[in-house]
Image (cartoon, rainbow, N blue to C red):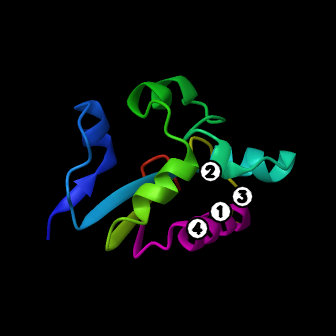
Amino acid sequence: MKIGHLHSCIQDNRVLDNFDSIIIRTDFETWDYCKKHNVDLLNCFYGQYSQRAKLRELIYPNIKYKHWLTIASQYDFVFLSANADVNPDRQDFRKYVKEMVILFQVDMVGAMNECF
């Protein structure tokens, strides 16, 4: 199985290759902000409300969640990368992960090093 990673495709400024699977990155802070302020997550940029928003914008320019949802729908296997720059409440973090799994219809979930 080939593994596709959105990060490398965007950095190379090339069209997404034809992979069987992809890693989709999500972040707790943007999800949390949207929940608290009744903002549509799909219209937000990845990491828009995180502590590292400027860095994430450099790595993933102009990638809104609605774009990632469209991209994810083209793959047979989706790995969800759940990120948090802060230590969220465990119950809130579980809600976030559950909603992202349902939204992207992921097959596997991983927590990045920022998560507890």
Q: Which residue is mark 1?
A: 96
Q: Which residue is mark 3?
A: 89
Looking at the image, which residue is at 69% across and 68% down?
A: 95
Dot 4: few (<14), some (14–19), or many (≥20) neighbours within 10 Å?
A: few
Residue located beneath label 2 in the image: 28
Quadrant of the rendered image containing residue 45: top right
Q: Is residue 46 visible?
A: yes
Nearer-N-terminus badge (4/1): 1
- Residue at 50%, 49% (x, y): give it: 67
Between the C-alphas of marks 2 and 4, the distance is 14 Å
Asked if the residue under mark 1 is in contact with the one under mark 2, i.e. CB atoms within 8 Å, the reply is yes
Task: Please state which amino acid type lies under the numbered disc 2.
Answer: Phe
- Dot in front, 4 or 3: 4
**Mark 4 → mark 1, Cα distance in angstroms:** 10 Å
Instruction: Please tell me whether the stretch drawn in magenta is mainly helix, strand or loop.
Output: helix
Callout 3 amino acid: Asp
Who comes first in sequence, dot 3 or dot 1?
3
Q: Could you tell me how far apart the alpha carbons at marks 2 and 1 are, in whole angstroms?
A: 7 Å
Mark nearest the camera among 3 and 1 is 1
